[in-house]
Image: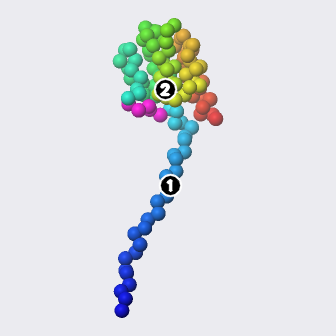
Amino acid sequence: MEKKSTKKSAKKTKKAAKPAKASKKDFLRNVPAKQYFHCADGVVLKNLLDLALRLDEMHYDVFRHHVNEHRNDFSAWIEHSIKEPELAKRILHSHSMHETQKTIFMYIIERLLK
């Protein structure tokens, strides 16, 4: 007489992982710690909103250290770490804290309304 196997098949089907749906707010999330922006005065910026809000309190000399006729560190950070090349391009030639802050806030509003 033949014995019937009582074990169920251990075969499991794996579902393919779905890519996470991008949220409208993803561009406002913190960047990885290695990509934080370290201001000349020691303040650490973790995301785009940190930068926009910090510009209100930033000393002019600190801003000039990062944004001058030779470079725009904020534009570079936004392009390479935040991954928002359109905004980086918009602020590349901004030479005032107010203009930079206004441009960032306008960009945030535009993105959230899309």
Residue to which mark 2 is pinned: 80
Q: Main secondary structure of the magenta part?
A: loop
- 66 sits left or right of 6 in the view: right
Which residue sits at x=49%, y=26%?
A: 80
Separation of marks 2 and 1 at Cα, in angstroms = 30 Å
Residue 31 colored magenta? yes
Q: For mark 1, what is the residue?
A: 16
The one of 110 and 91 positioned closer to us in this rendering: 91
Q: Secondary structure at mark 2?
A: helix
Q: Is residue 49 visible?
A: no
The residue depicted at 64 percent of the width and 35 percent of the height is 114
Pinpoint residue 77: horizontal percent, then vertical percent: 47, 23
Which residues lie in the magenta part?
29-33
Image mark count: 2
Q: Is residue 5 left or right of residue 23?
A: left
Coordinates of residue 87 in the picture (x, y in percent): 57, 24
Location of residue 26 with respect to 102 vertically, above or below: below
Whether the residues at callouts 2 and 1 have beta carbons within 8 Å, the answer is no
Q: How would you rate the neighbour count of disc 2 (Cα within 10 Å): few for under 14, some for 14-19, many for 20 or more?
A: few
- What is the three-letter code of the residue carrying label 1? Ala
Q: Nearer the viewer, residue 63 or 86?
A: 86
Residue 78 x %, y %: 50, 24
Q: Which amino acid type is shown beneath numbered disc 2?
A: His
- Judged from this view, the residue extending furthest toward the bottom is 1
At a point 44% along the width and 65% down the height, the residue shown is 12
Q: Say whether residue 51 is magenta.
A: no
Give the image's coloring scheme. Answer: rainbow
Label 1's element? Answer: loop
Q: Is residue 6 visible?
A: yes
Q: Position of residue 16 (x, y in %)?
A: 50, 55
Q: Quadrant of the N terminus?
A: bottom left
- Looking at the image, residue 76 sits to the left or right of residue 42; the answer is right
